Amino acid sequence: MPRGRPRQPDELKALRGNPGKRRLATPKELRGLGAAPSAQEIMPAFLTQHRERELFVRIIDDYLQRRIARSSDANAYARYCAWLDRWWTCKEAIDGKTTWYESSSAHSKKLARRHPLFKDMMDIERVLESLEDRLGLNVVSRQAIIRGLATAPSVASGFGDKPADNQAGEQPIVDDRPPSPIGLGRLN
């Protein structure tokens, strides 16, 4: 009788990225299945500025390799890079200037007003903060995403399985036990 862990199919190993790095006996197209695409392959066309494109490559390459981002997230990350480039442009224009200026009204009063570029920077910063929270670009949101990836079942775990259809009159099985404090395992 054979012992040890049952052998996993090579397709499943390819989906998981072949952690053991052993040679897989699968076709060539399945061997590259676990590899993440490069940033150049998925860069959206609306990123036209050099700085936008540079930011996109720097951010998305790291996140694709860590599997935090998927290629379907490219537009959201590109939008963030476009807004960040816009924020930097405002910052460069306002550097060395005050954030307010004096103007006079029709009644000859001197008024202190906010600089329009400073207002733009503040508006853009609100957009950037919300995008950072959604995309995992700050520490707290990135940890939440990683925690979610660690507890979520693997995409490849149901490889080859099809959900069974409920027969008429069958009741679904309900597990009334409380969740285990050790994660996916069960006590008793």
Image: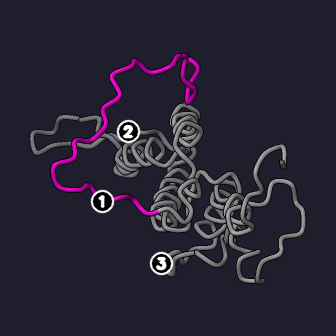
Identify residue type, mark 3: Phe
Which one is closest to the eye, mark 3 or mark 1?
1
Q: Residues within 10 Å of mark 2 (few under 14, many from 20)?
A: some
**Kind of element beneath mark 3:** loop
Mark 1 and mark 2: Cα distance apart in space? 67 Å
| Mark carried by residue 46 | 3
Q: Nearer the viewer, residue 122 or 101?
A: 122
Q: Nearer the viewer, residue 65 or 113?
A: 65
Could you tell me which quadrant the C terminus lies in? top right
Q: Residue 173 magenta-drawn? A: yes
Q: Nearer the viewer, residue 86 or 37?
A: 37
Question: Which residue range is magenta in the image?
Answer: 162-188
Q: Residues within 10 Å of mark 1 (few under 14, many from 20)?
A: few
Q: Earlier in the sequence, mark 1 or mark 2?
A: 2
Dots 3, 1 in contact, CB < 8 A:
no
Residue 35 image-quadrant placement:
bottom right
Identify residue type, mark 1: Asp
**Kind of element beneath mark 1:** loop
Q: Earlier in the sequence, mark 3 or mark 2?
A: 3
Image coords of residue 11 (percent x, y): 69, 69
Q: How many marks?
A: 3
- Please give the residue where the numbered disc 2 appears in the rendered image: 100
Q: Earlier in the sequence, mark 3 or mark 1?
A: 3
Identify residue type, mark 2: Trp
Q: Is residue 169 left or right of residue 8?
A: left
**Kind of element beneath mark 2:** strand
- Please give the residue where the numbered disc 1 appears in the rendered image: 165
Image coords of residue 21 (percent x, y): 88, 60
